[in-house]
C-alpha cells in the first residue's frame, strides 16, 4: 500500500511536471554546444588534412569535457528518470505477482501442478492405448489364424478331392477292351463318401504365430472342422458322384469305339481313335475349366471374407476414454547429463542453422565467447591457430 501512495503523491507528480521540461531543455542545450565544439575540431582536421599533436591534444581535452558533460546531464535528469523508473518498477512488481511465467507466483505454482497432472493423465492414456493396441493385435492375429486355418483346410480338401477325381479320370483314360469290365466296376464302386478318418486326421500345416498357444490352435482347428465338415462331406459326394456319372455314361460309347477300332483297318482305327481322343480332350478341358472356376470363386469368397475381417478390425478400436483430458502441448526438452553434451548440440545447430549465418550474425551471437578469447590473447598471449581466425590490433588513445 505504501508503494501505491508513493506513486500517486502530489509532490511526485509535481516533480515530474515541473522538473522534466527544464532538465530536458538544459541537457539539450549542453548537447548542442558539445556537438558544435566537437564539429569544429572535426572541421579543423579535415581542413588540415589530418591530425597534428596540437589537434590531438585539443581532441583529448574535448573528449574529457564531453565525458564530464554527460555526467552532469545524467545528474540533472536523474531525479526525474529515477522517479519514472520507480513508477515502472512498482507497476512491474504488481504484474509479476500474478505472472504465470514467474517462479513462486500462485499462477506459476498452479501451472506446475497442471503440468504434472497432464503428464500423469497422458501417461495413463498412453498405457491404455498401448494395452488396447496389444489387445487388438492379438485379436487380429486370432482372426487371421482362423482364416488361415480355414484356407489351409479348404486347400487340403481340394487337393484330396482332386486326387480322387484324377484317379477316376486315370481309370477312364486307361480303359481298353481287355480291362473294360474291371474299370467299369472300379469306377462304379468307387465310394462317394468322404472318409471319416480323413476329416478326423485333418490338421493345419501353417506355422503357429508367436502369441497363439497350441491349445488355442487346436481349438480353432476343432471349431473350423465342425463348421466345414458338412460342407466338405456334401461337396465331396456331389463332385465325385458327378464325375462317376460322367465317366459311366460315356464308357459304353468308348467300348463301342474301341470295338470299331479293333475291327477296322489301320486308317479307320486311327481316325476313330483321333476323334475319341479329341472328344475326350475337349470334355476334359471343359471339366477342368469348370473346376478352376469353382476354385476361383472359393478363393474370391475367402479373400472377401479376409478383407472384411481386416476392415472390421480397423473400425473395432474402442473410443478413447470419455473422462476429462486436459489440453496439452508436448515439446521435446534437452537435459544435459554432463558438460560434454553441449558439443553435439553445437554440432547439430551448426549443421542446420549456424553455417547459414553471416559473420556479423555469428559475432553477435557468440560475443561473450569471442570477448573471452580476445582477453585471453591480450593478457596471456594465448591465440587460436586457425585459417578462419585472425587477430588485429585495436588501438585506443587514453
Image: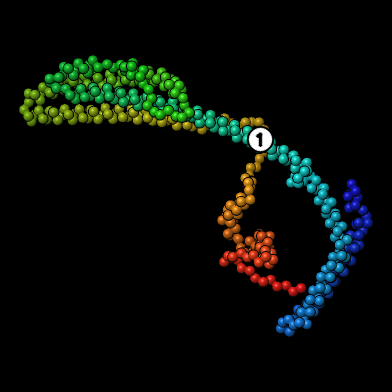
Q: Residues within 10 Å of mark 1 (few under 14, many from 20)?
A: few
Q: Is residue 208 left or right of residue 165?
A: right
Q: Quadrant of residue 23?
A: bottom right
Residue located farthest toward the right when viewing the structure as drawn: 11
Residue located farthest toward the left when viewing the structure as drawn: 265
Q: Quadrant of residue 51?
A: bottom right
The answer to whether one can see residue 28 in this image is no
Instruction: Decide: is 91 above or below 150.
Output: below
Residue located farthest toward the bottom when viewing the structure as drawn: 48
Q: Position of residue 7 (x, y in %)?
A: 89, 53
Which residue carries the number 1 mark? 120
In the image, 123 versus 342, the foreground residue is: 342
Instruction: Decide: is 112 above or below 7.
Output: above
In the image, 148 versus 190, the foreground residue is: 148
> Residue at the spot x=74%, y=39% of the render?
110
> Residue at the spot x=65%, y=34% of the render?
121
Amino acid at each position: 500500500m505504501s508503494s501505491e501512495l508513493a506513486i500517486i503523491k502530489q509532490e511526485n507528480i509535481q516533480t515530474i511536471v515541473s522538473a522534466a521540461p527544464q532538465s530536458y531543455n538544459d541537457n539539450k542545450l549542453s548537447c548542442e554546444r558539445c556537438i558544435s565544439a566537437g564539429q569544429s575540431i572535426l572541421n579543423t582536421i579535415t581542413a588540415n588534412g589530418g591530425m597534428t599533436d596540437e589537434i590531438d591534444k585539443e581532441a583529448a581535452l574535448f573528449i574529457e569535457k564531453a565525458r564530464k558533460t554527460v555526467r552532469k546531464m545524467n545528474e540533472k535528469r536523474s531525479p526525474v528518470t529515477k522517479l519514472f523508473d520507480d513508477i515502472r518498477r512498482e507497476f512491474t512488481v504488481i504484474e509479476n505477482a500474478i505472472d504465470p511465467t514467474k517462479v513462486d507466483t500462485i499462477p506459476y505454482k498452479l501451472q506446475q501442478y497442471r503440468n504434472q497432472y497432464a503428464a500423469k493423465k497422458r501417461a495413463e492414456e498412453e498405457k491404455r492405448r498401448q494395452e488396447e493396441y496389444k489387445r487388438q493385435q492379438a485379436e487380429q492375429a486370432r482372426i487371421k489364424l482362423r482364416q488361415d486355418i480355414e484356407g489351409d483346410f479348404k486347400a487340403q480338401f481340394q487337393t484330396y478331392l482332386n486326387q480322387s477325381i484324377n484317379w477316376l479320370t486315370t481309370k477312364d483314360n486307361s480303359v481298353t477292351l481287355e480291362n473294360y469290365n474291371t474299370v467299369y466296376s472300379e469306377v462304379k464302386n468307387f465310394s462317394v463318401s468322404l472318409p471319416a478318418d480323413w476329416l478326423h486326421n485333418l490338421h493345419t500345416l501353417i506355422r503357429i504365430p508367436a502369441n497363439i498357444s497350441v491349445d488355442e490352435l487346436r481349438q480353432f482347428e476343432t471349431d473350423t472342422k465342425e463348421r466345414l465338415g458338412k460342407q466338405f462331406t456334401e461337396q465331396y459326394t456331389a463332385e465325385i458322384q458327378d464325375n462317376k456319372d460322367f465317366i459311366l455314361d460315356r464308357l459304353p460309347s468308348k467300348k463301342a469305339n474301341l470295338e470299331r477300332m479293333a475291327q477296322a483297318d489301320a486308317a479307320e482305327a486311327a481316325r476313330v481313335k483321333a476323334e475319341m481322343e479329341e472328344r475326350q480332350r475337349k470334355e476334359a478341358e471343359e471339366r477342368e475349366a469348370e473346376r478352376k472356376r469353382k476354385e476361383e470363386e472359393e478363393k474370391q469368397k475367402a479373400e472377401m471374407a479376409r478383407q472384411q475381417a481386416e476392415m472390421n478390425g480397423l473400425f473395432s478400436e474402442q473410443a478413447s476414454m470419455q473422462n476429462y483430458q486436459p489440453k496439452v502441448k508436448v515439446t521435446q526438452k534437452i537435459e544435459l547429463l554432463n558438460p560434454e553434451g553441449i558439443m553435439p548440440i553445437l554440432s547439430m545447430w551448426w549443421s542446420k542453422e549456424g553455417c547459414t549465418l553471416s559473420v556479423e550474425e555469428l559475432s553477435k551471437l557468440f560475443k561473450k565467447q569471442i570477448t573471452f578469447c580476445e582477453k585471453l590473447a591480450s593478457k596471456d598471449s594465448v591465440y587460436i591457430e586457425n585459417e578462419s581466425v585472425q587477430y588485429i590490433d585495436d588501438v585506443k588513445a587514453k
